[in-house]
Image (cartoon, grey):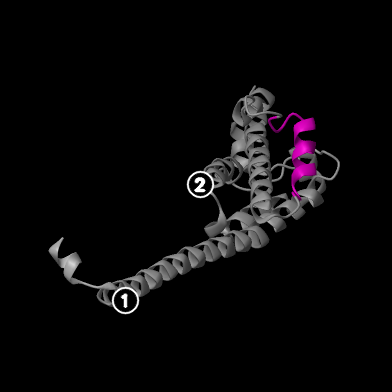
Amino acid sequence: MIIAQVMGPKDWALILTPMATILAVLLHDAYQFVKDKRQIHHQKQLEAYETFYVPAIKWFYQLNPDGASYQEMKWNNPDVDKMDQLITENIKYVSPEILKIYILYFRSAHEQGSVKTDSGLDISMDFLNSTPKEAVQHQSLEIAKYFHALMVTITTEANKESRKLGMPEIGKPMLENLQDMNLAPKNKREGLWRLLHKRFDK
């Protein structure tokens, strides 16, 4: 109280002016840090979108323009095997959910070897020779289930990224196509795995 009475306006100005300057610098630095962080995050999102999601959706349209099943896609287009290349070459952009499904797909499609059956699926000759027909069919359905799960998950994520970046949802028609085939949930209550298990598990 005594100090306040002794100090005049000029004295207060000498104290407050540097403090205000320091505060202004700190606020500017904090704002710039947040701005730079957002720009870096936006750039990473855009990079992932253009490098992984856009090529994936483009490939899905080329593979499945008429709502073909996995077996039909595999029979008509050996390029189905590009899924391995698409994910492994863009691993840093792949979400944990996609990676989890890809591991299941890879095991089903490749751990037995690589021989094309009459349905166009790659299954090892040893597996074919020593396993009942029902088991081979089950293996084929497992591969199809995980492949479609990857299509649905990648397309759904691509649409979310499109909205975040303010771009058209290029995967929306593909997702609607998968929904019409009962391979993608039509609402949040209808889970993807429940739908696919119902469709493929015998």
In the image, residue 47 above or below residue 161: below
Find numbered disc 2 in the image and state the secondary structure of the residue it sits on: helix
Residue type for callout 1: Pro
- Residue 118 visible in this rendered orientation of the protein: no
The answer for how far apart the CA atoms under marks 1 and 2 are is 50 Å
Q: Residues within 10 Å of mark 2 (few under 14, many from 20)?
A: few
Quadrant location of the C terminus?
top right
The foreground one among 43 and 179 is 43
Residue type for callout 2: Pro
In the image, residue 88 above or below residue 141: below
Find numbered disc 1 in the image and state the secondary structure of the residue it sits on: helix
Q: Residues within 10 Å of mark 1 (few under 14, many from 20)?
A: few
Q: Is residue 54 left or right of residue 93?
A: right
Using the image, tell me which numbered label, if any, was put on residue 18. Answer: 1
* Total tally of numbered discs in the picture: 2
Q: Are marks 1 and 2 in contact (CB under 8 Å)?
A: no
- Residue position marked by numbered label 2 in the rendering: 96
Q: Which residues are magenta?
A: 169-185
Measuring from the top left, give residue 42's x and y in whole percent.
58, 61
Measuring from the top left, give residue 140's x and y in whole percent.
67, 35
Considering every residue shown, the one lying at the far right of the view is 66
Q: Quadrant of residue 102?
A: top right
Mark 1 vs 2, N-terminal side: 1
